[in-house]
Image (tube, rainbow, N blue to C red):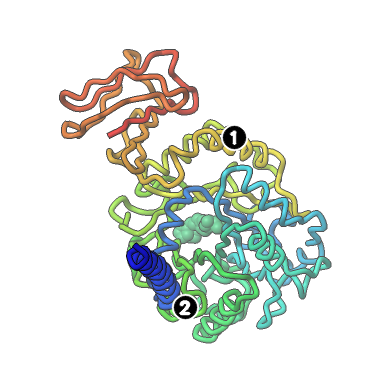
Amino acid sequence: MKTKSNQLTHVYILIVVSIFCAVMLAGCDLISRKVVLTGEELRAEQAKWFQDAKFGMFIHWGVYSVAGRGEWLMNNEKLSIETYEKLTERFNPIEYDPAEWVQIAKDAGMKYITITSKHHDGFAMWDSKVTKWDIVDTTPYGKDVLKMLADECEKQNMPLFFYHSHLDWHHPDYFPLGQTGHHSGREQKGDFNKYIKYMNKQIAELCSGRYGKLAGFWFDGWWDQQVKKPGRQTHVDWRLQETYDLIHRLQPQALIGNNHHEAPFPGEDFQMFERGVPGRDKYSKANFVSKLPLETCDTINNSWGYNRTDRKFKSPKQLIRYLVMTAGYNANLLLNVGPMPNGQIQTEAVRCLKEVGKWLSINGETIYGTRGGPMPPQNWGVTTKKGDKIYVHIFQVPENGRVALPNTKKLKVKSAKLFKDASEIEFNDKGNVVLRIPRNAIDPNDTIVVLEI
Ligand code: H79
């Protein structure tokens, strides 16, 4: 008896020790795998996070905000560099509170922030060491607003992208001039390669770690040098690969996108579209929609940079539908605010965003973490999917209440329920799936039906 129980004890000990070793080994394996993740693997993880995130805040803020006539002020009003530089004297955003900005984004249900580090006017919103043309060296405010935001984002777990303009209306070596910025009064000469060096030095500053671990870069202005639209040829050599390699070396997880309105170039990790869902946007062609993660950007009123007279704010309902539409097109929505020169975001915008956030706090399940489809967008609305659920978002319920889902003959539907209250929705899946939406189920923003498959 004694020996038997001894044996048993041995067996138990052996089992416990084996389990312990197995757990330790698995742990080590996990740790070592983390260590050896390549840049590409890191970006693949980041890309998945990005697609799940669905909704971001775009921020256009610069010295142009002082005038309140948008970020194209220098070009549109034909201002010389000398005149334009005077704006810095009045850029003193003493009300700037990055914690408040991050909170506004969070309350809106936004999962990341993309802010202008440098727009086309070349003005650096951080303490750049390679130029005096920055917020610290020229303004009475004198603080590195990007650093302040980056610190707050880190504290509040809010991923941060930088919008960075290739095009530069201010730098003496941005030559030859492109399609824009012809009234700056610059000398008609310059060394473009020197400009690229300058730009990469600035990007290296942004990637140095001082601004944390970056979610990515959002480039714009490549098109200034485009030979013919559409087309991939430019009057200058942008040496994109060098810039992209630099970023991926210093910040391997950072996603790179470039708003050139062409099909993605090598080294780009996501594709963006300006003003409109992918393929129906203002600048590109439908066939340019790639397999990369997609993002649509647009404004709440009609302006990117602060515009005092632009009162054309979209309604919360329009914004909610825009977000749902982009999700249905398998894209994110990057929705812009143009903070005022005092550092505050206009109350009109904050109010709109709050409403979207309220809607998302109830309906977020049908947006976050989903992918567009399975059916392409329809006249009546769009679909999103996640796991064994399809979320049917109906904007226009037909008079007879019948919503037909094309190409769903093979789809076996286990249940169809109204997302709002889980009440059963009548359906027929003998051929294409047809839903029958009762009038009292209709939601003025978006009538959502969940199909379990
Ligand atoms: O940052 C915001 C805008 O300032 C910027 N992109 C968003 C995100 C933007 N830059 N340009 N545009 C928006 C419109 C560009 C129009 C163009 Fe053209 C058409 C550029 C090239 C052809 C008109 C003609 C302007 C320059 C030549």
User: Residue 297: where, in percent of width, then height?
Assistant: 49, 51
Residue 172 position (above or below residue 379): below
The local secondary structure at tag 2 comes to helix
In whole angstroms, how far apart are the C-alphas of marks 1 and 2? 40 Å
Quadrant of the rendering where the C terminus is positioned: top left
Q: How many marks?
A: 2
- Disc 1 target residue: 358
1 vs 2, front mark: 1
Q: Position of residue 104 (x, y in %)?
A: 66, 46
Picture residue at 57% right of the left edge, 65% below the top: 162
Which residue carries the number 2 mark? 243
Three-letter amino acid code at disc 1?
Answer: Lys
Nearer-N-terminus badge (1/2): 2
Residue 19 in sight in this render:
no
Q: What is the number of the mark on residue 105?
A: none
Q: Is residue 368 above or below residue 252?
A: above
User: Quarter of the image containing the N terminus?
Assistant: bottom left
Residue 203 at x, y percent in the picture? 56, 76
Drawn side of residue 197 relative to residue 450, left or right: right
